Amino acid sequence: MIAPRRHLVRLEDLTATEVTAIHARITELQHKWARDGEVASVNVVWNLGASAGQTVEHVHCHVLERGREGDVLPGYGPRWWLKRHLRARSLLRLVAWMNPSLGSTESRER
């Protein structure tokens, strides 16, 4: 996880210096992992706001190691459930079940 030192809730509140520092850290990790032969690819995930799945209101991103040698699940990144219609419907049902305030997903599935 990479986060700025100051507490921020909105991405647009990052200064140019903070954006540059976050980008540099992501790039540094990617280069180090590639150099060490550990990881060929990464997913950078930002969840910004409660409706996007963020549970702590603080600007941060997750750098997920992907593409290891012999990876048996290539392409199964953070959004793989949404890539297929059936999986997306199942995920919507699960989210609705976990968050009763969202109501039924029946109308959204069609």
Image (cartoon, rainbow, N blue to C red):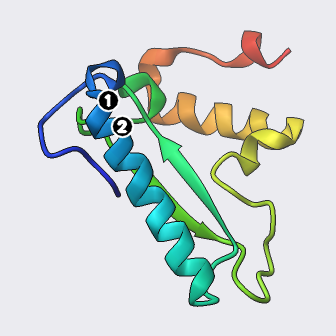
Within 10 Å of disc 1 (Cα), the crowding (few <14, some 14-19, many 20+) is few
The numbered disc on residue 81 is: none
Quadrant of the drawing holding the N terminus: bottom left
Q: Could you tell me which quadrant the C terminus lies in?
A: top right
Lateral position of residue 3 relative to residue 20, left or right: left
**Nearer to us in this view, 79 or 22:** 22
Q: Residue at x 23, y 36 (%)?
A: 58
Task: Please tell me whether residue 89 is drawn above or below residue 36 in the rendered image.
Answer: above
Q: Residue 17: horizontal and vertical position, in percent? A: 27, 36
Three-letter amino acid code at the position of disc 2: Val
Whether residue 92 sits left or right of residue 33 in the image: it is right
Residue 15 position in % (x across, y down): 26, 27
Q: Which residue is drawn at the image coordinates 75% and 88% (left, top)? A: 69
Q: Is residue 79 visible?
A: yes
Q: Secondary structure at mark 1?
A: helix
Badge 2: residue crowd in 10 Å (few <14, some 14–19, many ≥20): some
Q: Relative to residue 28, is residue 33 depicted above or below? A: below
Label 2: which secondary element: helix
Q: Amino acid at mark 1?
A: Ala
Q: Quadrant of residue 47?
A: top left
Which numbered tag is attached to residue 16?
A: 1
* Spot occupied by residue 49 in the image (x, y as percentages of width and height): 36, 25
For the residue pair 67 and 99, the one nearer the viewer reads as: 67
Q: Disc 2 marks which residue?
A: 19
Q: In this rendering, is residue 50 above or below 90?
A: above
Point out residue 18 in the picture as x, y percentages from the top left corner. Answer: 27, 38
Contact between marks 1 and 2 (CB within 8 A): the answer is yes
Number of callouts: 2
Residue at 62 percent across and 79 percent down: it is 34
The structure residue drawn at horizontal position 80% and vertical position 60%, both measured from the top left corner, is 75
Query: Whole-Å distance between the Cαs marked 1 and 2?
Result: 5 Å
